[in-house]
Amino acid sequence: MPQERKALHKSYHDNYYGFPIHNDNELFCRLVLEINQAGLSWETILKKEATFRKAYDNFDIQTVAVYTEADRERLLADPGIIRNRLKVNAAIENAKTIIQLQKEYGSFEKWLELNHPKTIAEWVKLFKKTFKFTGGEIVNEFLMSIGYLNGAHDASCAVYKKILDADPLWNRK
């Protein structure tokens, strides 16, 4: 693996993967990135993260939720992101859904916490009922990547203790 690719993966692995996220816009970002990864490599998404952030107004939920047809067409024409109509539509619709969850529960994070713990099957059922374009692999990776499901790192991994120190929900009694 070339050095640049290694650095990209190492940064995500060591600093983001499995760590709890306490900001709704960043939770939305991770959900959008996981949805866009479907059928592609995670490396492709990591390489495009900066252009995703620019294209989706830094994943500001309030802004994305009111995107117009012109915004949708702009996204579908943007070579810096994944130009898949279903994935673009999912991002916009899921932003609207998160706003509803924020109104009802105070935040996206609180909604996630309220539903914890669940089995992966229960999570998938809930996500499919609540969000667009969320199948089993997307839901599993999203929840693992934000500290709701164990498995991002095994106990022998140097990052594992840092994850425990960050108090992921899967480790709470």
Image (cartoon, rainbow, N blue to C red):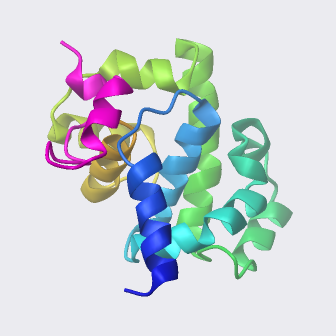
Q: Is residue 40 above or below residue 135?
A: below
**Residue 65 relative to residue 70: left or right:** left
Q: Foreground: 114 or 170?
A: 170
User: Percent from the top left, x then y, of residue 59?
Assistant: 69, 47
User: Percent from the top left, x then y, of residue 106?
Assistant: 58, 13
| Residue 163 lies in the magenta stretch | yes
Which region shows up in magenta? 148-173
Residue drawn at point x = 39 percent, y = 76 percent:
41
Query: Total label count?
Result: 0
Q: Quadrant of the N terminus?
A: bottom left
Residue drawn at point x = 70 percent, y = 57 percent:
53
User: Percent from the top left, x then y, of residue 138?
Assistant: 34, 55
In the picture, residue 161 is in which quadrant?
A: top left
Q: Foreground: 115 or 169?
A: 169
Q: Is residue 106 above or below residue 140?
A: above
**Direction right: furthest residue:** 70
Name the magenta segment's main secondary structure.
loop
Q: Foreground: 72 or 170?
A: 170
Residue drawn at point x = 53 percent, y = 39 percent:
27
Q: Let me know if residue 140 appears in the view.
A: yes
| Residue 107 lies in the magenta stretch | no
Q: Is residue 110 above or below residue 17?
A: above
Q: Let me know if residue 148 appears in the view.
A: no
In the picture, residue 130 is in which quadrant?
A: top left
User: Percent from the top left, x then y, of residue 173?
Assistant: 18, 12
Residue drawn at point x = 34 percent, y = 25 percent:
165
